[in-house]
Amino acid sequence: MKTLQLHVKALIILLVIGTAFASCSSDDDVAIAKIKYQVSINASPSNGGTVTPQSGEFEKDQQINITAIPAAGWQFKEWQGNITGTANPMQLTVNATKTVTAVFERSLFYLAENGVTVLAPDAAVGNSGVVNGITYTKRTADQITPENAETTCTTGITDMSELFMDDTNFNGDISHWDVSSVTNMSLMFYKASSFNRDLNSWDVSNVTDMSSMFSKATIFNGNISNWNVSSVTTMFGMFRDTNAFNGNISDWDVSSVTAMNQMFYSSVNFNGDLNNWNVSNVTDMSYMFWETNAFHGNISNWNVGSVTNMYHMFRGAGNFNSDIGNWNVSQVTDMSGMFTDATSFNQNLNAWNVGLVTKMNNMFSGASVYNGNMHNWQVSRVTNMDYMFSRATNFNQNLTNWCVIHIPSEPTGFANNSALTNSNKPRWGFCL
C-alpha cells in the first residue's frame, strides 16, 4: 500500500514538473511571436501627398507595402531613410526600428491654392502638362492666339498689352491664367466686343498700366471685384465705351493711380459705389465720367487735392448730382466743360477754391437745372469763360463780385439762352 502511494506521489511530481517545463516553453514561443518594431512613415513636404500605411508598430520580419499618394499638383519623387529608390509602392521588411520618408515635388503644371489658376514656374516655354484632365502648354505672349488661349499657361509673361485688341469674336475662358508677373495690360481687350468672362481670380498685383484695358469691350461686365490694383498708376480710358459694365469695384485700392482721365468715358451703364476710393494721387480726371449717363454715385469723400485737370469731367453725366461742394480743387487749372449737359447737377460749390483755374469755358453749358451759389469764387486767373453758362436755363446767381481782370469784355456766348440777367453778370475787365 505504501509502495502504491509513493508511485502515485512520484507520478504527480513528474506531472507537475512536466507541466512547468511545457508552460515555460509555451511562454518563450509567445514572447518570440510578439516582438515588434516602430516604423515611422512620413511625407515631405506634408502637403505634397500621403503615405500608406501610417506610422506604427509592426511585427518582426513582417513585410509591408508602402505606397506614396501625391496630392493634386504634386508627383512622387523618391524614398529616403531606411529605404531608397523610386519604385512605388516599395516593400519594407521590418527587422529593426526604421524611418521611411516619401519625397514629393511639384508637378510642372499645377493649380494654385485658389483652385483656379494654372501655374508652371519651372516649365520651359513649349512644355505641356495635364491639370484636371486638360492639357495646358506654356507659351509666350506672342504665341497666344484666340484659338489656343484657353489651353495656355501664362506663367512668367510680363507684358499683355494689346493681346486681344480688335479680336471681336474672342470670348475664351481665360480665368485660369497666371498673370502674377504681368506689369502692362494696356489695350489688352480693346475692341474685344464679344468678351465677357469672370477674371476675378487673376492676381494683378504687379500691373502698373491698365490704360484702355477694356475700352470698347462693349459687352464686358465680368467680375473683377477682388482685383488688387494697388500697383496700378494709370487707368486712363480703362472702361471707356464699355456699354454693359457695372461691376462692383468699390474695394479697389487705387492709391497709386495718377491718371483717371476718360476712365468711365461713355460707360453708360456704370453706377458703382466709388466713395471710399483713395484718389489722393490722381492728377488728371478729364473726361472721367463723360456721358456716364447712369452714374449718380456718392463721391463726396474724394480727396482730389492733387488733381490739376477736370476738363469735361462730368460732361453729359445726366444723372449725376453728388454733393461735391467740399472738394479741395485748389490745384485745378482747367475746368472747361466740366458740367456741360450735366442736366441733373445742382449743388452748392461756393466753397471751392478755384484760384488757379485759367479755363472755365463751357463749364456749365447745358446744365439745365444748375443754380448754385458761386458768389465767393476767386476767378482772377481765368482767361476763358466762353459759353460758360450757355443753355443753363435755370442759372441766375449774382456774379458781380467776381474779379475778371483778364477778361476785358463779355466772353462769346457767356450766357446764351440762360436765365442769367445782365445785372448779375461780372463787371468785365474789373477786379472789385
Image (cartoon, grey):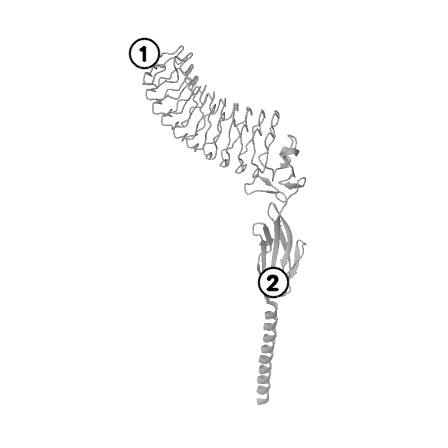
Q: Is residue 21 left or right of residue 225?
A: right
Image-quadrant location for residue 296 = top left
Reply above or below: 375 against 250. above
Name which residue type carries label 1. Answer: Ser
Q: Return the x and y of residue 199 as percentages of the image width and height.
A: 55, 33
Q: Which mark is residue 423?
A: 1
User: Measuring 57% from the left and 42% from the top, which residue is drawn there?
Assistant: 112
Residue 215 picture location, percent across and down: 54, 25
Rendering coords of residue 286 (x, y %): 47, 24
Q: Is residue 294 visible?
A: no
Residue at image x 62%, y 52%?
A: 68
Circle 1: element type: helix
Amino acid type, callout 2: Lys
Taking 87 as reference, is 422 above or below it? above
Query: Callout 2: few (<14), some (14-19), or many (20+) C-alpha neighbours within 10 Å?
Result: some
- Residue beneath disc 2: 98
Image quarter for residue 422?
Answer: top left
Q: In the picture, residue 369 is in which quadrant?
A: top left
